[in-house]
Image (cartoon, coloured by chain):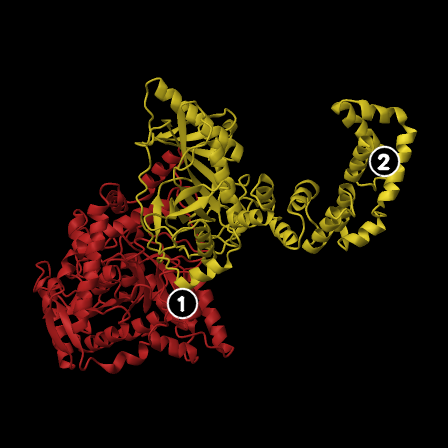
Chain colours: A red, B yellow
């Protein structure tokens, strides 16, 4: 059942939030042991919240647009009184004294938080295999990864545990798992959603966004969490655009460009079945009245390299605070310096350590200009190339992920092959632009394929219109 | 600039550049709503941002920016677009293990400060940054290496600081003291800081080098930290200059170092060499936007600046006819408005400064420029003696009122000259031996006997006689 319908029925008193919740808890009880989408399921808290919603409805109040809708939140967003782990040992025992702005907004809209979802440690990874608490499995084939880093949130929606969830996207961490799990995933314009309370990975790239089973539900959740927040200096001051009202407007007259460098026309790594679905998606948009052609956005091919300097550089600084002094894990030693080292050695996993080292190196005296400085120049080039492309096109199109879901363990031995899975999603983060993944049929293995719709900053309305067209035209998805 | 500073070691010139950190007098911290207040129980003036909790984000305090601009304008700096940067290093009292500071784009560029003697000392920059917490080492006599454990108080963490980096234009301990005093007076005058060195709200690091008198090239400098008062600054500079000269004269070279001033031992010791200096890995702070103060805002702030100590000294000197120690002291004490207003009302500048200097040490109370000027007019007009004027002044300070009325109520009537002559003549006839001694004696004896007669007159008139008039009368009688 869609989130919109749940909210409608709860608000009108047709169904109780409690019964909605219990239905979902039943699904969770049945499949969660196998999937491991959650780090924690908050049964008691969720029941109390659902009962509260029901009593408000009974009292004639309107709990809001997400009344009684069960939601899951990626475990890198702070929740007051509830452990927030980032799937890392280093945050062991830490309980945030405050809620992330998005968590507050969910509660204010009447949503019922049922749990915190698993992720690659500190959101660093593309398969949710880098979690200190075990892997999350793809609900459509449990031998496969769900993608990452928001694999838990994607799997929770795909498995029917919740109709909606929140993820964070630094280089594709919402869109790639959405594609691999066959759900809708949106990375909004940088600044559209407050980052206050999102544990930072790479501050200039991180953005929170929704997972949903439908484009319409994704729009509903995005509307709830968007909007200015004075606690985030990078938050956009303007009021967000209304998405729900434009969803059915179609793409008649729109100009859409397929990014040559990020599709099978220009990139060897794009699998044939993924490229085939992209072609069909383009045809569907044309059939709906858009003009679609292939176009070059040349600098996007350098995105991956620039990203793997900028993101680790920021991360090396953002993750410095996990030093054993104020919160989380502490491994005692004779001096504070030794304590820092012992704590961080024990608390961080290999991928996090790898990126901290990469970033520290890239910012070091004598290397800064060659790495960080040059990467920022690439970032500027990408912004300029996109600006040129958007002078000719309303939207751009690419695959979300070069392949369908890969097998657990398939890429863990070679970080570079893992990094390459984000090649199509990274440019939007570097530019601060919105983009989203829409399920569009399946690959040769029967696993879902995602098509990525890219838009210029604040271009969410047009992006959602195209996504709705793709959703309507999509061939049957994968059966779970 | 020609050095007039006394040489600490003959034949050697000491060159000093100061880095002054001043806490800005804001209500809340630099990047959060936690209070900016000295003292308090440890860890009570804190919040998620000042503790650097995961997910917290900085929001710039506009008042801190305004105060920084006030400092910049008062120091004749270029106020410019600025960017915050992260200065990365691990230390337990720094919550995020990086400090938000400004690096290549400080809010205030090049400026100068004018000393009381008119010399201008160059200012390289004055930038914004946040303060750290404070560590207390418990056990082992408070020394870090012998302590059993350390406690950290984060009350100070995140307090806004302005770091004022001076050029190496100072030439001795006295220069350095004059610079810091003047800087402090400016900061207090413009309301930017309370300038209390003893509470650590103003801290000074000294860059000291020496060179043979006449050498143009600067020597290798050492930075001396942990200076807690003007007195210890002077001692530290003198110690450090001697140490460096000793090294050079015994054929050794100076290593660029950071050194620690030990107040108890009266010496500096090495903290680290240039090679051991931290690589701070500065990069632009992605969580904050650049600060771009508008021309209008800068103009508004400039218009709101009070008259600066330098301008006030010039103004008083002009009114008083000369710049003296008394005019400088009057400005330091903030009594120059009263002085200038009284002089403008016709009061004798010399008497104004003498009274301010000698008779108003405990403040001016209810004294106004009008009553002060009126009092001095009575005094210089011969209606009140200096002693009487002092008594009336005390009453004006305590209760205010009209000086003539107070004088009259105190029974201070100007004495008729005939009345005074009669008293003097009577005393001469009553003390013939003393009078003879006065007439016949040498200068010393004359002076002594004059003093005797003045004392007798004062006794006879209960202090109401004008001492000057009595002396004149005695001189006339003895000459006649």
Give a yes or no on whether discs 2 and 1 share a subunit. no
A80, A198: nearer the viewer: A198
Q: Residues within 10 Å of mark 1 (few under 14, many from 20)?
A: many
Q: Where residue B141 appears, x then y in whole percent?
A: 52, 27
> Which secondary structure lies at badge 2?
helix
How many labels, in total? 2
Quarter occupied by the N terminus of chain A? bottom left
Identify the image quadrant of residue B207.
top left
Q: Where residue B203 appears, x then y in whole percent?
A: 48, 40
Front of the two marks 2 and 1? 2
- Chain assignment, label 2: B
Q: Is residue A416 left or right of residue A184?
A: left
Q: CA distance from mark 2 to mark 1?
A: 93 Å
Name the residue beneath numbered marker 1.
A106
Q: Is residue B192 left or right of residue B121?
A: right
Residue B262 in sight in this render? no
- Chain assignment, label 1: A
Determine the residue positioned at 25% across, 60% down.
Answer: A429
| Res. A240 mark | none
Q: Is residue B384 above or below residue A155?
A: above
Determine the residue positioned at 70% across, 56% down.
Answer: B370
| Res. B457 mark | 2
Q: Where residue B153 appears, x then y in whole percent?
A: 50, 42
B477, B75: nearer the viewer: B477
> Which secondary structure lies at badge 1?
helix
B108, B305: nearer the viewer: B305
């Amino acid at each position: 059942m869609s989130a919109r319908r749940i909210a409608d029925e709860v608000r009108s008193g047709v169904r109780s939030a409690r019964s909605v919740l219990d239905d979902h808890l039943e699904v969770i009880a049945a499949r969660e042991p196998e999937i491991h989408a959650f780090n924690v399921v908050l049964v008691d808290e969720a029941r109390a919240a659902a009962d509260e919603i029901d009593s408000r409805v009974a009292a004639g109040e309107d709990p809001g647009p997400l009344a009684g809708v069960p939601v899951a939140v990626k475990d890198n967003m702070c929740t007051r009184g509830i452990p927030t782990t980032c799937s890392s040992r280093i945050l062991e025992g830490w309980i945030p004294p405050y809620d992330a702005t998005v968590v507050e907004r969910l509660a204010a809209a009447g949503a019922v938080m049922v749990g915190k979802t698993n992720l690659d440690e500190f959101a660093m990874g593309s398969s949710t295999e880098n979690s200190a608490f075990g892997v999350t499995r793809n609900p459509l084939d449990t031998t496969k990864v769900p993608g990452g880093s928001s694999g838990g949130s994607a799997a929770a929606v795909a498995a029917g545990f919740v109709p909606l969830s929140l993820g964070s996207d630094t280089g594709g961490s919402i869109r790639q798992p959405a594609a691999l799990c066959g759900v809708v995933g949106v990375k909004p314009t940088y600044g559209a959603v407050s980052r206050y309370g999102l544990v930072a990975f790479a501050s200039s790239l991180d953005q929170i966004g929704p997972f949903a089973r439908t484009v319409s539900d994704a729009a509903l959740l995005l509307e709830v969490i968007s909007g200015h927040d004075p606690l985030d200096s990078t938050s956009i001051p303007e009021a967000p655009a209304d998405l729900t009202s434009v969803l059915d407007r179609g793409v008649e007259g729109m100009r859409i460009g397929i990014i040559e460098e990020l599709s099978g026309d220009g990139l060897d790594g794009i699998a044939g079945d993924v490229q085939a679905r992209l072609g069909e998606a383009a045809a569907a948009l044309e059939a709906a009245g858009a003009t679609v052609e292939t176009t070059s956005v040349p600098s996007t091919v350098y995105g991956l390299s620039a990203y793997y300097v900028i993101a680790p550089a920021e991360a090396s600084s953002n993750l410095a605070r996990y030093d054993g002094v104020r919160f989380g894990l502490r491994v005692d030693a004779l001096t504070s310096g030794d304590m820092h080292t012992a704590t961080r050695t024990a608390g961080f996993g290999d991928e996090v350590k790898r990126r901290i080292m990469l970033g520290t190196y890239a910012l070091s005296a004598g290397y800064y200009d060659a790495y960080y400085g040059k990467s920022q120049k690439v970032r500027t080039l990408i912004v300029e190339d996109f600006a040129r492309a958007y002078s000719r096109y309303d939207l751009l199109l690419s695959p979300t992920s070069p392949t369908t879901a890969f097998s657990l363990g398939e890429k863990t031995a070679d970080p570079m092959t893992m990094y390459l899975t984000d090649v199509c999603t990274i440019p939007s983060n570097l530019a601060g632009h919105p983009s989203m993944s829409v399920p569009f049929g399946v690959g040769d293995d029967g696993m879902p394929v995602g098509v990525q719709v890219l838009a210029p900053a604040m271009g969410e309305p047009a992006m959602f219109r195209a996504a709705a067209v793709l959703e309507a035209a999509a061939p049957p998805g994968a059966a779970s | 600039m020609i050095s007039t500073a006394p040489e600490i070691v003959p034949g050697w010139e000491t060159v000093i550049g100061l880095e002054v950190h001043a806490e800005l007098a804001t209500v809340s911290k630099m990047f959060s709503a936690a209070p900016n207040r000295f003292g308090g129980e440890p860890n009570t003036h804190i919040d998620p941002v000042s503790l650097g909790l995961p997910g917290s984000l900085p929001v710039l305090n506009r008042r801190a920016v305004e105060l920084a601009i006030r400092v910049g304008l008062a120091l004749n700096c270029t106020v410019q677009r600025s960017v915050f940067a992260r200065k990365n290093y691990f230390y337990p009292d720094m919550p995020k293990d990086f400090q938000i500071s400004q690096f290549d784009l400080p809010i205030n560029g090049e400026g100068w400060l004018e000393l009381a003697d008119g010399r201008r000392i160059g200012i390289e920059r004055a930038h914004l940054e946040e303060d750290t917490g404070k560590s207390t080492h418990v056990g082992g006599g408070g020394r870090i290496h012998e302590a059993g454990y350390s406690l950290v108080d984060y009350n100070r963490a995140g307090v806004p600081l302005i770091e004022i980096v001076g050029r190496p234009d100072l030439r001795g301990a006295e220069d350095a003291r004059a610079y810091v005093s003047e800087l402090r007076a400016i900061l207090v005058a413009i309301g930017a800081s309370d300038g209390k060195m003893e509470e650590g709200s103003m801290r000074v690091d000294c860059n000291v080098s020496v060179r043979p008198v006449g050498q143009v090239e600067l020597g290798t400098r050492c930075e001396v930290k942990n200076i807690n008062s003007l007195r210890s600054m002077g001692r530290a500079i003198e110690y450090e200059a001697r140490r460096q000269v000793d090294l050079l004269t015994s054929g050794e070279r100076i290593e660029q170092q950071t050194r620690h001033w030990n107040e108890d031992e009266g010496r500096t010791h090495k903290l680290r060499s240039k090679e051991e200096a931290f690589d701070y890995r500065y990069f632009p702070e992605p969580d904050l936007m650049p600060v771009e103060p508008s021309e209008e805002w800068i103009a508004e702030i400039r218009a709101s600046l009070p008259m600066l100590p330098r301008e006030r000294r010039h103004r008083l000197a002009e009114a008083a006819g000369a710049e003296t120690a008394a005019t400088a002291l009057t400005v330091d004490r903030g009594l120059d408005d009263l002085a200038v207003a009284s002089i403008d009302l016709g009061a004798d500048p010399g008497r104004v400064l003498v009274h301010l200097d000698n008779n108003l040490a405990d403040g001016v109370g209810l004294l106004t420029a009008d009553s002060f000027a009126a009092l001095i007019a009575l005094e210089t007009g011969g209606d009140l003696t200096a002693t009487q004027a002092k008594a009336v002044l005390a009453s004006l300070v305590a209760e205010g009122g009209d000086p003539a009325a107070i004088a009259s109520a105190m029974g201070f009537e100007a004495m008729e000259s005939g009345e005074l002559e009669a008293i003097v003549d009577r005393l001469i006839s009553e003390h013939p031996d003393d009078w003879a001694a006065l007439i016949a004696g040498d200068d010393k004896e004359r002076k002594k006997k004059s003093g005797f007669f003045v004392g007798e007159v004062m006794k006879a008139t209960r202090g109401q006689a004008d001492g000057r008039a009595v002396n004149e009368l005695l001189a006339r009688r003895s000459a006649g």
